[in-house]
Image: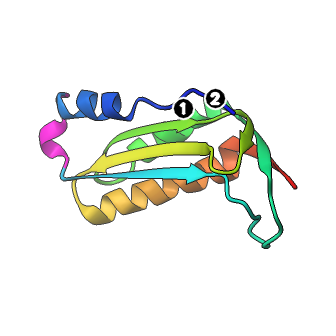
């Protein structure tokens, strides 16, 4: 189990004191965790997770280009994870609700489909 966690409070402090803070009307955060079952419903005891570090940076840059998205932060765990462990944190801030929801959804989609490689243990 990884003991490293993302600096959520630091992220928000940096963003809120940054030059674009007055443009942000909403923040959304996603925390993905290891479930005790697969999507198919079979029991899971944990997972092995790795990720493409450059791919994560690219995902952040791509989402930052979306309409109304002002800031993006993401952290992905790596290694042997147990049920309940954090898989990822993703944070998107932007001007209006619909832009922020779309940005967070796209960020999580990219991370899950293009950035991480996970193998569930049963």
In magenta stretch: residue 19: yes
Which residue appears at 37% of the width and 62% of the height? 101
In magenta stretch: residue 43: no
Q: Residues within 10 Å of mark 1 (few under 14, many from 20)?
A: some
Q: On screen, 105 above or below 78?
A: below
Span colored in magenta: 18-24
Q: Quadrant of the C terminus?
A: bottom right
**Mark 1, secondary structure of its residue:** helix
Which residue appears at 20% of the width and 28% of the height? 18
The numbered mark at residue 14 is none
Q: Position of residue 41 (x, y in %)?
A: 78, 72
Q: Position of residue 118 (x, y in %)?
A: 77, 46
Q: Position of residue 17 (x, y in %)?
A: 17, 28
Residue beneath label 2, please?
53
| Pick the front one: 24 or 67 | 24
* Separation of residues labelled 1 and 2 (CA atoms): 7 Å
Q: On screen, 21 above or below 53?
A: below
Q: Quadrant of the N terminus?
A: top right
Residue beneath label 1, please?
57
Which residue appears at 60% of the width and 28% of the height? 3
Residue furthest out toward the right: 122
Query: In this figure, what is the number of numbered marks?
Result: 2
Residue 91 in view (yes/no): yes
Q: Is residue 83 left or right of residue 110?
A: right
């Amino acid at each position: 189990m990884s003991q490293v966690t993302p600096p959520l409070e630091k992220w928000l402090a940096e963003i809120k004191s940054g030059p674009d803070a007055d443009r942000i009307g909403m923040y959304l955060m996603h925390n993905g965790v290891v479930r005790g079952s697969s999507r198919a419903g079979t029991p899971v005891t944990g997972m092995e997770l790795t990720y493409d570090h450059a791919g994560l940076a690219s995902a952040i840059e791509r989402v930052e280009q979306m309409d109304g998205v002002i800031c993006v932060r993401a952290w992905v765990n790596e290694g042997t994870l147990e049920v309940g462990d954090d898989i990822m944190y993703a944070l998107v801030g932007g001007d209006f609700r619909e832009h922020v929801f779309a940005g967070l959804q796209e960020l999580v989609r990219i991370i899950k489909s293009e950035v991480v490689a996970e193998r569930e243990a049963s």
